[in-house]
Image (cartoon, rainbow, N blue to C red):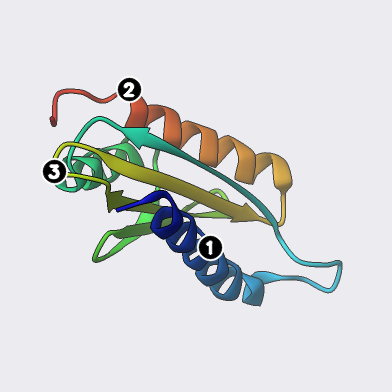
């Protein structure tokens, strides 16, 4: 997957997250969104395994899986994790969190992303 394909995929993920989470908006405005991505030196299967374990360890509940995406909720915040293959040995990870409380969205995004980056035993 080349850089343009990755950027397109990220754009689609962010657009999907906005559409999915916009329904949570209150009269005061749309929910806050925090996202971040990074390359992982592991295949997409291991990236998804890391995501599953990290979401569980972070206390995310109501987890759902679909293809290369994982979704769940914690403390009024929603999180979406996407793993995309770059090659047989590397993946690109995107973590998006949203909440009416910007601090909670940021905390959840950072927590899940840090846990995924730190895991090695699944590789």
| Residue named by callout 3 | 88
Element under label 2? helix
Task: Kindly give the residue lying farthest to the right in the view shown.
Answer: 28
**Image position, residue 90 (x, y; %):** 23, 38
* Viewer-nearest residue: 100 or 40: 40
| Residue named by callout 2 | 118
Alpha carbon separation for disc pair 3 and 2: 20 Å
Q: Earlier in the sequence, mark 3 or mark 2?
A: 3
Residue count near mark 3 (Cα–Cα under 10 Å), binned few <14, some 14–19, many ≥20: few
Residue count near mark 2 (Cα–Cα under 10 Å), binned few <14, some 14–19, many ≥20: few
Alpha carbon separation for disc pair 1 and 2: 26 Å
Q: Earlier in the sequence, mark 3 or mark 1?
A: 1
Q: Would you identify the image quadrant in which residue 82 lies?
A: bottom left
**Image position, residue 35 (x, y; %):** 57, 46
Which of the labelled discs sits on residue 11, or is there none? Answer: 1
Q: As drawn, is 94 to the left or to the right of 51? A: right
């Amino acid at each position: 997957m080349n850089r343009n394909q990755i950027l397109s995929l990220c754009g689609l993920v962010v657009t999907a997250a906005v559409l999915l989470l916009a329904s949570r908006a209150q009269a005061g405005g749309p929910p806050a969104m925090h996202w971040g991505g990074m390359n992982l030196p592991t295949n997409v299967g291991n990236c998804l395994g890391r995501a599953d374990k990290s979401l569980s360890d972070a206390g995310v509940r109501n987890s759902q899986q679909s293809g290369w995406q994982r979704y769940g909720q914690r403390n009024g915040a929603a999180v979406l994790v996407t793993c995309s293959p770059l090659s047989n040995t590397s993946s690109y990870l995107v973590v998006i969190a949203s909440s009416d409380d910007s601090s909670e969205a940021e905390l959840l995004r950072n927590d899940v992303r840090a846990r995924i980056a730190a895991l090695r035993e699944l590789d």
